[in-house]
Image (cartoon, helix red, strand yellow):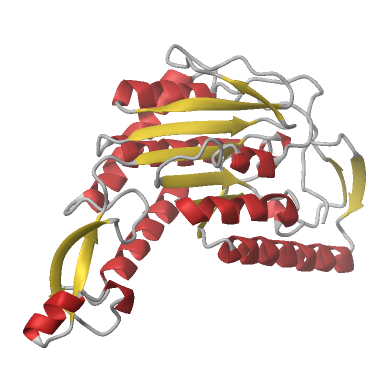
């Protein structure tokens, strides 16, 4: 299915958040803090809700508990089935893989897709640094050329077409603010991106077990990024955040609609008054999203879909709440 797109200029333009990054990011962080802090009460459990890696206390087995967590020594002593609770490491390292290729410079809802990417990065960053953990990022603007950016504290790194930029993992709120400014100030440039190469940057060099968050529209062919995603899941907890615009799911009836693929520059005129064309488009879009969901599920990644026409933060809150409910199901509060 062809990518839904808007006319884009051949020269890179600054991100919408870049011109007002300080004010926007300050309001964004305040919004994230108010809504997400309520979910962070209680025992520390890491960024991505799920079982930790450190042994904790034992308790009696309840229906629904994972049998792989059975505490056999306690079970043998008490003759009552027990499971061992686990807690996350206090020092967690989180890595963001942010796809800012040209297909993200599009939006017909309340936000552009790239703005949702920056907003998701702000939310994940807040969840990470609040616990005193480290967070880093790799940013893809298209192509497959990699250049390190070791100093990003004072502002965004200089990137060119086809650049993958690595921002080293650091702890602290000031460092996190610098990372977000770097992300918001990264210019989207024409050219087809390589999502597989972006994800592969999180696999090299090998790191100790942590959390990897991939934010993209995943419109690149699944065979390009599915294998790196599976490889990433072997060592890390993986969260895939898919950013979607409603026009990528269905076409409106607006007559002849000129569209441009921002990654290739190809221009198409689409007669949207044809109901059969709109139906075929919707069916192809549904099949495409099903393929993406299946590839993410096959990779073992948690999957969160954010839309440009919805409250993205509310969707994130519901996702975190659902994950924590699943984690604590059947346990004693």
Q: Is residue 142 above or below residue 227?
A: above
Residue pictured at 29% horizontal, 26% vertical:
172
Q: Position of residue 306 (x, y in %)?
A: 53, 52
Residue at figure coordinates x 65%, y 18% from the top left: 159
Choose between 61 and 15: the one closer to the eye. Answer: 61
* Quarter-of-image position of residue 124: top left
Q: Nearer the viewer, residue 268 or 109?
A: 268
The residue drawn where x is 49% and y is 32% is: 137
Residue 112 at least partly seen: no
Find the residue positioned furthest to the top.
154
| Horizontal arrangement in the rendering, residue 304 relative to residue 59 (left or right) | right
Residue depicted at x 42% and y 15%: 153
Question: Is 317 above or below relative to 27?
Answer: below
- All told, the count of numbered labels is 0
**Residue 218 sits above or below residue 189 on the image:** below
The image quarter containing residue 14 is top right
Residue 330 visible within the image: yes
Quarter of the image for residue 86 reads: bottom left
């Amino acid at each position: 299915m062809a990518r839904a797109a808007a006319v884009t200029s051949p020269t890179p333009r600054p991100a919408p958040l870049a011109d007002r990054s300080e004010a926007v990011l300050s309001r964004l962080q305040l919004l994230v803090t108010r809504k997400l802090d309520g979910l962070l009460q209680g025992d520390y459990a890491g960024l991505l809700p799920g079982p930790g890696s450190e042994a904790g206390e034992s308790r009696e087995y309840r229906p629904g508990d994972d049998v792989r967590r059975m505490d056999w020594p306690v079970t043998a002593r008490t003759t009552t089935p027990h499971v061992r609770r686990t807690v996350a490491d206090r020092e967690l390292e989180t890595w963001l893989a942010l796809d800012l290729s040209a297909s993200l410079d599009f939006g017909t809802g309340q936000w552009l897709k790239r703005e949702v990417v920056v907003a998701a990065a702000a939310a994940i960053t807040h969840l990470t640094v609040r616990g005193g953990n480290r967070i880093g990022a790799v940013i893809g603007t298209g192509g497959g050329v990699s250049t390190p950016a070791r100093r990003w504290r004072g502002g965004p790194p200089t990137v060119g077409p086809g650049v993958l930029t690595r921002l080293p993992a650091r702890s602290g709120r000031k460092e996190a603010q610098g990372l977000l400014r770097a992300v918001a100030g990264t210019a989207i440039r024409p050219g087809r991106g390589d999502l597989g190469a972006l994800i592969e940057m999180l696999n090299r060099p090998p790191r100790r077990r942590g959390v990897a968050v991939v934010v993209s529209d995943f419109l690149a062919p699944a065979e390009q990024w599915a294998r790196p995603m599976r490889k990433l899941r072997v060592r890390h907890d993986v969260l895939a955040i898919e950013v979607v615009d409603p026009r990528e799911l269905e076409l409106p009836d607006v007559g002849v609609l000129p569209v441009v693929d921002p990654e290739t520059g190809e221009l198409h005129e689409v007669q949207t008054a044809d109901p059969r064309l709109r139906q075929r488009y919707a069916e192809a879009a549904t099949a495409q999203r099903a393929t993406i969901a299946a590839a993410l599920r096959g990779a073992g990644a948690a999957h969160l879909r954010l839309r440009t026409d919805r409250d993205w933060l509310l969707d994130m809150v519901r996702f975190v709440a659902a994950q924590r409910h699943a984690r604590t199901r059947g346990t004693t509060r």
